[in-house]
Amino acid sequence: HEKQLQALVRRRNQLIQMINQEQNRLAQTNDCVSRASIENMLLHLKNEQKEIDRRLERLVTVQFEQDCRVSILSSVPGVGIVTVATLMAELPELGHLNRKQIAKLVGVAPIIDQTGKSDRRRKIRGGRTQIRNVLYMATLTATRFNPEIKAFYQRLLARGKEKKVALTASMRKLITILNSMVRNQEPWRDSAKQKRRPGPVV
């Protein structure tokens, strides 16, 4: 089941890459015949992606229903079944590393670029691209529907951070939260609600 999950996740990534390539080709041609061919291919690839997504959902919800990582990761607003499947298949270290290590492994840790005029500028590089791609999409959703990530993202924007910088920082925050949750085997808790919760009557 683990091998099947990894194979499906990787096939989905291949389909996404092919869809992006065909979309780029579509934008670069005005020939009617070529455009029709590309559009047909895009339709086929997108249908294949939908089928892979359905298979992933069935596999994760049925075969891994006893795996606590599924319920823990799925409890986070913004984290969908594709993100859960990708993290389980491609990031077995989740929950076993500290926050700096997991951020660096995924490729969202800021690294100082000390070459030439870029001295002291921090960039992200390396890491596992496939995980970073799904984490990017999950974070985009989280900045709208996850109270903690949304508040964090808005604070960075209010401080004058560029959207790209704020989103990368939010990606880093989300993966460290997921890492901590899996390590502690605790589902998502809305910290804002916890702060508003009245204390016990003594």
Image: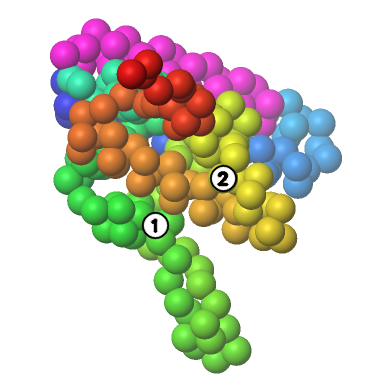
Report the magenta residues as a range. 38-66
The quarter of the picture where residue 8 lies is top left
Q: Amino acid at mark 1?
A: Gly
Q: Residue at 53% across / 53% down in the picture? A: 168
Q: Residue at 17% across / 26% down in the picture? A: 2
Residue 23 at x, y percent in the picture: 66, 38
Quadrant of the rendering where the N terminus is positioned: top left
- Residue 67 in the figure: left or right of residue 18: left
Q: In terms of sequence position, does the residue under pointer 1 or pointer 2 come before the other?
A: 1
Q: How is the image coloured?
A: rainbow
Badge 2: residue crowd in 10 Å (few <14, some 14–19, many ≥20): some
Q: Secondary structure at mark 1?
A: loop
> Which residue position holds label 1?
107
Residue 140 visible, this orientation: no
Residue 104 at x, y percent in the picture: 33, 59
Q: Is residue 52 above or below residue 131?
A: above
Number of callouts = 2
Quote the CA–CA distance across marks 1 and 2: 20 Å
Using the image as rendered, state which of residue 31 and residue 97 is in the foreground: 97
Q: Residue at 37% across / 26% down in the picture? A: 188
Q: Residue at 34% across / 37% down in the picture? A: 178
> Which residue position holds label 2?
152
